[in-house]
Every structure is written in structure tokens, then in C-alpha cells.
Amino acid sequence: MGVQLTKDSIDLGIIVRDIDAALRFYRDLIGLEHVADTPMGGGTMHRFLAGDSLIKIIEFDEVPDAAAAPGGLRGASGYRYWTMSVSNLEEVVDHARSQGYNVPTGPTEIRPGVTIAMIEDPDGNWVELLQQA
């Protein structure tokens, strides 16, 4: 049967341990458009747009006990990365490196005309950038 979608994009929630570091990454480095801050029980949801998708960066008043499992793709099961299609992959990767962010996978052509890179956010979550020629 499957779901009957009412929206052609997704909303993604990312729980963070250090909101200032997360905002520098998602707002300042990645360049997501800030749309609103919404109080929620025990914290705040900072809402950003990535195209039509809503990226919700959530800080709780009490930092969660457990952190994201390290190790990228092979470090654990579960959600390990998400992908954004971009037109300036090299520029963003160079800027990320200059700002001290970990780039575990530098620009790599995975098939003819398709290049990816992975950048790690301050909580160890990976964001994949994909550029098509």
C-alpha cells in the first residue's frame, strides 16, 4: 500500500549537543536558510530549509547522555548520513577544511559525472554533498 505523501520533500530532525557549533556548521558553512526558532518541551527547534526539505536542528535544555556513534558509514547501523545535491562541491569542501571541519571523504568521482564528498558536523553526523557534471 504505502504512504500517500502530501509533500514532495522530507523533514529531518538532528539532535545536537552544542547548538552554537551546530549553527556555525549548518547555517554558516552549509548555508541552510534559517526560517524560524520554535520552543518545544525542554528545548528549542531551529528550523532551516534545504530546498523544499526542512532541517530541524534541535537543542534540549539538558544535553542527551549518549552521543552519536562515531565511525561514519561503517561505525554503526541506523541513520548515518544524508545527501544534498549541490553545484559548488569543491568550494564548500575547501571552505570546510579551512574552518577545521573533518572531511572523511574528499571529492570523489563515484561514477562518471557524479562526484561526492562527506563532511562531518560537530556531533559526528555526516552530510554528503553530491554534484553532477
Image (tube, rainbow, N blue to C red):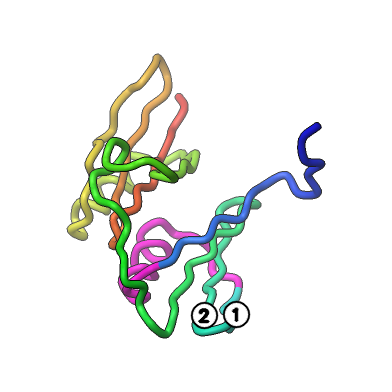
| Magenta stretch bounds | 16-35
The answer to whether residue 24 is magenta is yes
Tag 2: Cα neighbours inside 10 Å, few (<14), some, or many (≥20)?
some
- The reply, left or right, for residue 39 in relation to residue 88 is right
User: Which residue is drawn at the image coordinates 43% and 35% (left, top)?
Assistant: 130
Q: Residue at x 28, y 33 (%)?
A: 107
Q: Residue, x 60% and y 76% (percent of image)?
A: 36
Instruction: Give above or below for 67 relative to 69.
Output: below
Asked if residue 1 lies in the magenta stretch, the reply is no
**Residue receiving disc 1:** 38
Q: What amino acid type should be assigned to the residue bearing mark 1? A: Thr
Q: Is residue 12 above or below residue 113?
A: below
Look at the numbered discs 2 and 1 and tell me whether their residues touch, using CB distance below 8 Å: yes
Q: Which residue is mark 2?
A: 44
What count of labels does the image hold? 2
- Which residue is at the front of the view, 78 or 109? 78
What's under tag 2, amino acid-wise? Thr
On screen, 11 above or below 107? below
